[in-house]
Amino acid sequence: MFDILSSPDAWVALLTLTFLEIVLGIDNIIFISIAANKLPEKQQKKATFWGLVLAMVQRILLLFAVSLLIGLKNPFYFVETTWFTAGISGQALILLLGGLFLLYKSTTEIHEKVELPEHEEELLEAKNITSLRRALFQILIIDFIFSIDSILTAVGMTSGIGDKPQDALVLMVIAVVISIIIMMVFANAIRVFINKHPSMQLLALSFLILIGFMLIAEAAHLSHASFFGSEVGSIPKGYLYFAISFSLLVEFLNMKYRKKEEIIEDLEEKKEVHKVKPPAKDP
């Protein structure tokens, strides 16, 4: 079953696919971090760990059911009006619901962070999710949405590799397992970093809104949706990751600038205290 690993082309495909799985999993880690940070501190690491384990199990199960997943691309319902046409498929419906869920979840999280609750009970409710089970349920939903994109990318990259039908499946499973293990190593550090810096929390939630819009646009593209005769095109993911990377770079520069300003303010305060301090009297 692992004969495919003796091929140099298979190793190149495996390394490339693993890298892409990690890149595609960044948005997943962001969501898991935000969901886990709303739990009590003792349960945050557990939620992060089990969230990624669920993601790995779910993706492997989807790989074994990849023929069913690809079959969801066929439209099962057509909409035709004077200004709008579309062929609704299972894949498009999943991405549409996932995009709407991300928009709803992200906007409510931002609202909780920027709006001051009127009552103390609302403040406690906004700070913590009621249970670990609820957090894992939310993570499981979004894992499924992100798994669709991940699996379809893996299928496209391993198409035609190996002489046996299971060769591509072996590579995809290995790539998913390796990528999830790597994400497990860094996930908690990312979660702590996001939780420690409020501006990063809002930036991460903004990324999720952006990803939600991208999922909705991708659903429209898969449905060949057309508005007033113009078909919705696909949004290249490179644009999305460039925007996220550029925003992170700007935020890191802002954090460094704020830290420098704090150091300067501390030095000025020490100077003022030293000036005001009366000279010591001679005995």
Image (cartoon, helix red, strand yellow):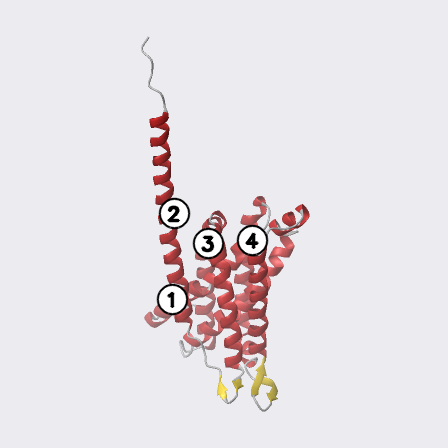
Badge 1 or badge 2: first in the primary sequence: 1
Pick the front one: 183 or 222: 222
- State the CA–CA distance, disc 1 to disc 3: 17 Å
Residue 8 image-quadrant placement: bottom left
Residue 160, percent from left and from top:
41, 79
Residue 278, percent from left and from top:
35, 20
Q: Disc 3 residue type?
A: Met
- State the CA–CA distance, disc 2 to disc 4: 21 Å
- State the CA–CA distance, disc 1 to disc 4: 26 Å
Q: In this rendering, which labeled residue sits more in front, label 1 or label 2?
A: 2
Q: Disc 2 residue type?
A: Arg
- State the CA–CA distance, disc 4 to disc 3: 12 Å
Q: Disc 4 residue type?
A: Lys
Badge 2 or badge 4: first in the primary sequence: 4
Residue bearing mark 3 = 200
**What is the secondary structure assignment of the residue under circle 4?**
helix
Please give left or right for residue 120 compared with residue 245 in the image.
right
Badge 4 or badge 3: first in the primary sequence: 4
Residue bearing mark 1 = 242
Badge 1 vs badge 2, beta-carbon distance below 8 Å: no
